Image (cartoon, coloured by chain):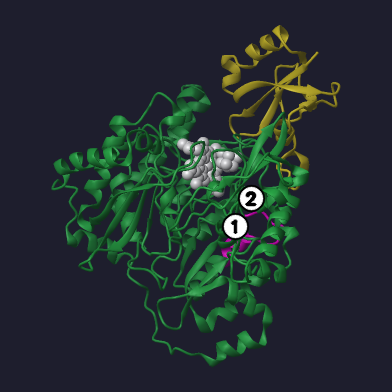
Amino acid sequence: MYKYDDYDQQLVDERIEQFRDQVNRRLSGDLSEEEFRPLRLMNGVYLQLHAYMLRVAVPYGTMNSAQMRQFAYIARKYDKGYGHFTTRQNIQFNWPKLVDLPDILTDLSKVQMHAIQTSGNCIRNTTTDQFAGASYDELEDPRPWCEIIRQWSTMHPEFTYLPRKFKMAVTGAPNDRAAVAIHDIGLRIRRDDQGDLGFEVMVGGGLGRTPMIGKTICEFLPKEDLLSYLEAILRVYNQFGRRDNKYKARIKILVHEIGAEKFAELVEKEWEEIRDSVLHLPAEEIEEIQAHFNPPAFEVLPAHSSAYSEKVSSDQKFAYWVQNNVREHKQQGYAIANISLKPIGGIPGDINHQQMDLVADLADQFSFGEIRSTHEQNLVLAHVKRDDLYDLWQRLDEYGLATPNSGLITDLIACPGLDYCALANSRSIPLAQRISERFGELDRQHDIGKIQIKISGCINACTHHHVGHIGILGVDKKGQEFYQITLGGRADENAKIGKIVGAGLSTDEVVDAVETLINTYLDLRENADETFLDAFNRVGETPFKEALYGAGKK
Amino acid sequence: MTKQVITANRLDDGLAVFYGLDGQWHSSVSQAACVEKGEAAENLLANASNEENQLVVVGPYLIDVCGETGTLEPVRYRELIRTKGPSVRPDLGYQSN
Ligand code: HEM
Ligand code: SF4
């Protein structure tokens, strides 16, 4: 894992002292709320319905056990005993007091964590594949590149006041688990004809009011040119992006208005000028960063383990967990274990302090002390010996963390919605809970197979509902909570925006509607291997629409 | 006739609070000063937003309420949630007391 150098630590420490001073000046009246608000937002502090909210960055979703333990400590000491993992791989605390926040940030800095660039119109935490460095299908670990981007973009003077927030994601595998196509910039590591590794660069993805899939403006960018090319993109955006209208300020609007080709031309022109500048990345510098992400000291293990096979065949509950939550590792004898934060009927992404401490202990014991957060609001232990899986599973199960539902219908993604969020139209969590309960039975989940439901409480689309296989958006209809359904979206390497199927549904109707959609799929699928999404792509929206609204209606 | 009260978030801890007849901020909406929408409400809001109050709360605003003094309840669900706490965590927020 990347460790702060003296410069990083000093920068973070100075920021906290500045913030402590700013909080004091707000409390004494030297700063008005108007003056203070942007300052607190730059430090990840929002004001929500019930209280302040602190968003802590988990750079590219990788943390160590000490950091997880510190989250547990903060949840206990300053908050109400829990935290919430978000779709941007970060963690949020829902009840911190303003007067405690400088101390919380100090405690975080002791484990090299902070909340800088988790808010505001700057370059945000770069997200990536939660299986980075572990997955069998990976060309290269994307995290060193996220770290290179982090170092370049942190406090970058030119990019602290962008027209709007800016989000990037990187995938190192052809199977895209990082949803790169719906980010302002998406990077996909790929090989060219000579077999060299570089980046496919996509720009202008994003959801919200105007959902768009990113467009490729460079098929293959040599690695050493990454930063100069990114800087060129940002400069073009900074120069031409709209600042007159908040809703039109994202880069996706610029790319859409002038066209991807024209945008690419502008970038090329800018890039020519800075390509050989200090932003050029020499191989040694890249290797130096990569060294922080060297694979852990894997043992040489046999391809087959009879002890493990015996457990799988003798314990059905364990076998289900393995089937659903364990993924193939590139190192023989190791596995990737998904820790579900989606207990049946629970709150997606929430984790209490005892569970955090447990996960930290289990990471130390079984996975080289390292933990990942996922954009699906779950956790991952990325490097577990296959022979340790049974012990790991038992310990997780004791704490309610072994729900075997990774990728299944109850692995729902939901934002805080109207239960916490000041911007919400409708509640998201209770809906997620009701859907989870409705489909909670494991046999039924297995029958339904892989499917992703994403629920956002407003059009900001924090859960990426537009690209959910089933997306649910909370809307306000004359003061009532209503829900609009989209179908057929996807966030993977074939990313696509879902289609709105019809009029909004009331709180009472919406869970039944989801069940109707699922039953329709089960009736029309060709066989059990045809997923919901495949079936939808084959037959189109009509059968689903008719099932929901009756034939002939819109 | 629409009745209104003033709400805000307390500066130091962020909790939802309501402006009382006594010029203090209370954690229960039932202690809020209830006035008629219009001039009376705007005057009260001006008071609640003065310099002194800016040191106590963040962002005062008017909300519609129904019921009588003592049993006032916000009309909008959003505001009702603020008087109680998250609907999914009955153990948290004011509703837990
Ligand atoms: C509760 C406090 C939150 C507030 C006030 C908030 C606010 C916003 C706003 C205003 C946007 C739209 C910005 C734009 O399009 O320019 C946005 C986007 C986003 N938020 Fe949040 N959010 C909150 C919580 C969360 C949570 C809990 C998650 C993860 C579960 C999240 C993930 C995202 C993501 C991924 C986007 C980008 C969507 C896109 O591609 O357009 N946010 N948020
Ligand atoms: S989608 Fe809307 S309601 Fe949900 S967290 Fe984001 S801003 Fe809040």
* Chain A tint in image: green
Give me the residue at 70% from left, 53% from top.
A514
Residue A101 in view of the camera = no
Helix, strand or loop at label 2? It is helix
Label 1 and label 2: CA atoms lie apart by: 8 Å
Q: Which of A285 and A499 is in front in this view?
A: A499
Labels 1 and 2 touching (C-beta < 8 A): yes
Residue A384 vertical position relative to residue A118 in the rendered view, above or below: below
Residue at the limit of the structure toward the front, as seen here: A552
The picture quadrant where one finds residue A307 is bottom right
The picture quadrant where one finds residue A121 is top left
Read off the magenta span: A342-358
Give me the residue at 24% from left, 63% from top.
A192
Mark number for residue A478?
A: none
Residue A332 in view of the camera = yes
Q: Position of residue B48 (x, y in %)?
A: 65, 16
10 Å crowding of disc 2: few (<14), some (14-19), many (20+): some
Q: What subunit carries mark 1?
A: A
* Chain B tint in image: yellow
| Residue carrying label 1 | A539
| Residue carrying label 2 | A542
Q: Is A344 positioned to the left or the right of A152 in the image?
A: right
Q: Where is residue A451 in the image (x, y as percent from the top left)?
A: 60, 61
Give me the residue at 49% from left, 22% from top.
A32
Residue B43 vertical position relative to residue A81 in the rendered view, above or below: above
The quadrant in which the C terminus of chain A is found is top right
Q: Where is residue A116 in the image (x, y as percent from the top left)?
A: 41, 43
Q: Nearer the viewer, residue B29 or A307?
A: A307
Q: What residue type is labelled 1?
A: Val
Based on the picture, tell me whether residue A365 belongs to the magenta stretch.
no
Helix, strand or loop at label 1? It is helix
